[in-house]
Amino acid sequence: MSKLQFYNSMSRKKEVFTSIEPGKVKMYTCGPTVYNFAHIGNFRAYMFEDLLRRTIEYAGYEVTQVMNLTDVDDKTIRDSIAEGLSLNDFTAKYKKSFFADIKTLRIETAEHYPAATDHIPEMIAIIETLLEKGYAYRAGDGSVYYSIAKFADYGKLAKIDMENQRTVERVQNDEYAKDSVADFALWKAWSANDGDVAWDSPWGKGRPGWHIECSAMSMKYLGKTFDMHTGGIDNMFPHHEDEIAQSEAANGCTFVNYWLHCGYLIVNGEKMSKSLGNFYTLHDLLDKGWSAREIRFVLLSTHYRKKLNFSEKALEQARNSLNSFRDFFIRLKKAAGADQPKNELILQKADDDFAAAISDDLNISGALAAMYSAMHDINKLLDKQNLSANFAIKILDLYRKFDTVLAILDLDDVNEPAIPEKITKLVEERQEARKSKDFARSDAIRDELKAEGWIVEDSPDGPVIKSV
Ligand code: AMP
Ligand code: ZN
């Protein structure tokens, strides 16, 4: 397989990937804030990370992935109090649904899913180091802030020109815009809004800021310097910038070698987000009749750094593509011809083109093109009986290998569905109608078939019935 290359947000360039430890990759992926059901925009980020992980595995590496669960922050506290539940009881149901959803979407399981509330001592330890080293300061109310002016490299990821920043303010909230560079809270002193959510610390009762979570949990499970850190593009600032400031100041070494960010999933030109109210959950889509594989296909098939415009039309296209793969596999399973010398070349080219594309910064269009192109060529061979049963097995194995990266094809589960008698009768009736040139009736039957989940295609050998 070709060398892996990724676009590193830190250098804003594509770079050849080299892992710290040969054959092993350590990656940290920012996980969900468990105050609501994840929406399909969140899943775009997790799906990109799944494609990344599977591609790295395809290249032969062993991956150790950490995805944190943010189960304490302004939003989880606010909403748990509103529902009259303890923080743990409140977040438990969203954690549970998150794990169920990633399973449905066939997202590979990370090695660790640390929850923030289980790692408060680790966070306190880093804050103490930052205070000792002079990067942090205590505020009058018992909170602790990070002084970004003390960290010379502040802004290196988001490319903020610190020289030209007029003032640095102080913010309490975890999320803020790029134009408000700010000293951010490492530890937030307890306030009445927090109800009974508080931990003891050397600075009094309180709770951690959001950014310190990821510095503490990544270091605990992956070490002071690790290979990769990912998230949606909105995580780059302030979240990842602040993680770098904390970790590099505390540990005195590079935090992460490769930073990868995915673009937004948008609907009607706007970012899908809970605050805009323009979101679908996975279940909204499953309830509308779309399958998890179709949703997965849509989330994967736009290059991760581009904006992904989510629409029903895209889901329909995914359905069509998956149906053509399914028909192709069914045909392959029935192959009984004699091989041609060029068959081997088609197979080899598909294998090489797929690997070259996916290892080049996850070029999904190139990878899919390799799969479509081979399918096209092989379908032609099948038309002419120019493919043996043994060779068909090799092709099926190759697509099975591609599917370790994509997880959309279901090769071992493609069988021609049995056609119910009712459907065969309708098709016969349609043939009669066509013979007697009653096209209105024949069209009406076609619609009726479609409503039942079947389509009929007319071929020189007569009608072919397929399930939708
Ligand atoms: P949150 O639960 O808001 O912390 O977000 C979890 C992950 O989803 C982060 O990596 C975000 O960057 C990502 N994310 C949120 N909304 C979108 C969106 N519309 N498109 C792509 N990624 C998103
Ligand atoms: Zn994070």
Image (cartoon, grey):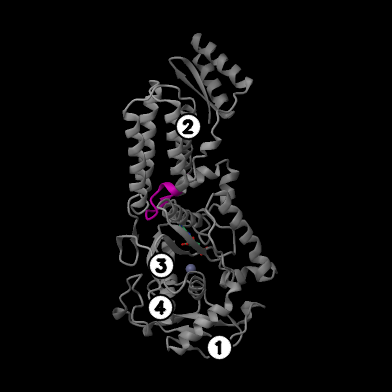
Q: Amino acid at mark 3?
A: Met
* Mark 4 nearby-residue class (10 Å; few <14, some 14–19, many ≥20): some
| Label total for image | 4
Write down the residue under mark 4. Answer: 248
* Mark 3 nearby-residue class (10 Å; few <14, some 14–19, many ≥20): many
- Residue furthest bottom as drawn: 140
Tell me the mark number nearer the camera, choosing from 3 and 2: 2
User: Is 306 covered by the magenta stretch?
Assistant: yes
Residue 31 location (% of width, % of height) = 52, 63
- Identify the mark at residue 142; answer none if there is no mark: 1
Whether residues under marks 1 and 4 lie with C-beta atoms below 8 angstroms apart, the answer is no
Residue span colored magenta: 300-311
Write down the residue under mark 2. Answer: 329
Mark 3 and mark 1 lie on one chain; the one further toward the N terminus is 1
Q: Amino acid at mark 4?
A: Glu
Write down the residue under mark 3. Answer: 236
Q: Which element carries disc 1, helix, strand or loop? A: loop
Q: Visible in this render: residue 310?
A: no
Q: Which element carries disc 3, helix, strand or loop? A: helix
* Mark 2 nearby-residue class (10 Å; few <14, some 14–19, many ≥20): many
Mark 3 and mark 4 lie on one chain; the one further toward the N terminus is 3
